[in-house]
Image: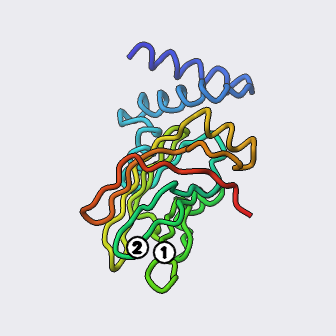
């Protein structure tokens, strides 16, 4: 309790002097003031709970924008994964603010169906970090689709510096379509056209 009060006092002193605390100090000071004055949980915890409740969160610091193609066949019965797409920061922010399109999401998978028709599976939930990508979505005919993958750090850096001209997988994970899982799916990176 004493640390909370001291952090609150330090934040108030800096504010009174007209100096803005750095980002880390501000993050610590603001919740402390709220906790002292209201006795409730700190604001960042409430934001985290809201993100979890919405099912959409991203915290990547790297630019992960691009297309990630599986290096083998993923899917059955004519429902075959073409690519996983990860958008830029602006698209994540818009989606999480409720600005959504019916044909595009910040994380989505595109599948090839019989008759050379492609359809996208948009996210019902996702969590994207610098190390992992998790997504769930549903296709009306083929059912629930989930992705749980991890970035291969050096391979991703090399591939991006070579504009996707690399044969090394940059993302490895599992994809489940309905009841069937494809483990150890390896994805190659492309920045797009």
The image quadrant of residue 92 is bottom right
Q: Residue at x 52, y 66 (%)?
A: 82
**Residue farthest to the bottom, as pictured:** 115
Label 1 residue SS: strand
- Left or right relative to 55: residue 31: right
Q: Is 45 drawn above or below residue 102 in the view shown?
A: above
- The answer to which image quadrant residue 95 occupies is bottom right
Q: Quadrant of the N terminus?
A: top left
Q: Which mark is residue 159?
A: none
Q: Relative to the observer, which residue lies in front, 95 or 146?
A: 146
Q: Mark 1, residues whose alpha carbon is within 10 Å: few (<14), some, or many (≥20)?
A: some
SS type, badge 2: strand
Residue 148 percent coordinates (x, y)? 40, 49
Residue 58, percent from left and from top: 52, 48
Q: Residues within 10 Å of mark 2 (few under 14, many from 20)?
A: some
Mark on residue 79? 2
Q: Nearer the viewer, residue 99 or 111?
A: 111
Answer with the quarter of the image where residue 35 lies.
top left
Q: Return the x and y of residue 81 as percentages of the image width and height.
A: 47, 65
Q: Residue at x 35, y 54 (%)?
A: 182
Image spot of residue 171 (x, y percent) = 52, 45
Marks 2 and 1: in contact by CB < 8 Å? yes
Q: Residue at x 44, y 61 (%)?
A: 73
* Mark with earlier residue (1, 2): 2
Q: Which residue does the numbered mark 1 point to in the structure image?
A: 112
Decide if residue 99 is on the left or right side of residue 21: left
């Amino acid at each position: 309790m004493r640390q909370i009060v001291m952090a609150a006092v330090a934040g108030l002193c800096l504010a009174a002097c007209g100096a803005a605390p750095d980002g880390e100090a501000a993050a610590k000071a603001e919740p402390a003031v709220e906790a002292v004055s209201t006795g409730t949980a700190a604001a960042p915890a409430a934001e985290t709970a809201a993100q979890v409740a919405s099912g959409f969160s991203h915290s990547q610091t790297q630019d992960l924008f691009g297309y990630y193609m599986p290096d083998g066949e993923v899917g059955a019965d004519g429902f075959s994964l073409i690519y996983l797409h990860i958008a830029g920061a602006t698209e994540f922010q818009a989606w999480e603010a409720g600005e959504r399109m019916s044909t595009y999401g910040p994380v989505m998978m595109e599948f090839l169906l019989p008759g050379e028709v492609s359809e996208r599976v948009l996210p019902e939930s996702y969590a994207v970090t610098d190390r992992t990508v998790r997504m769930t979505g549903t296709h009306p005919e083929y059912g629930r689709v989930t992705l749980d993958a991890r970035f291969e750090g050096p391979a991703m850096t090399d591939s991006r510096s070579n504009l996707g001209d690399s044969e090394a997988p940059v993302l490895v994970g599992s994809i489940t379509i309905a009841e069937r899982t494809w483990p150890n799916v390896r994805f190659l990176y492309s920045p797009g056209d």
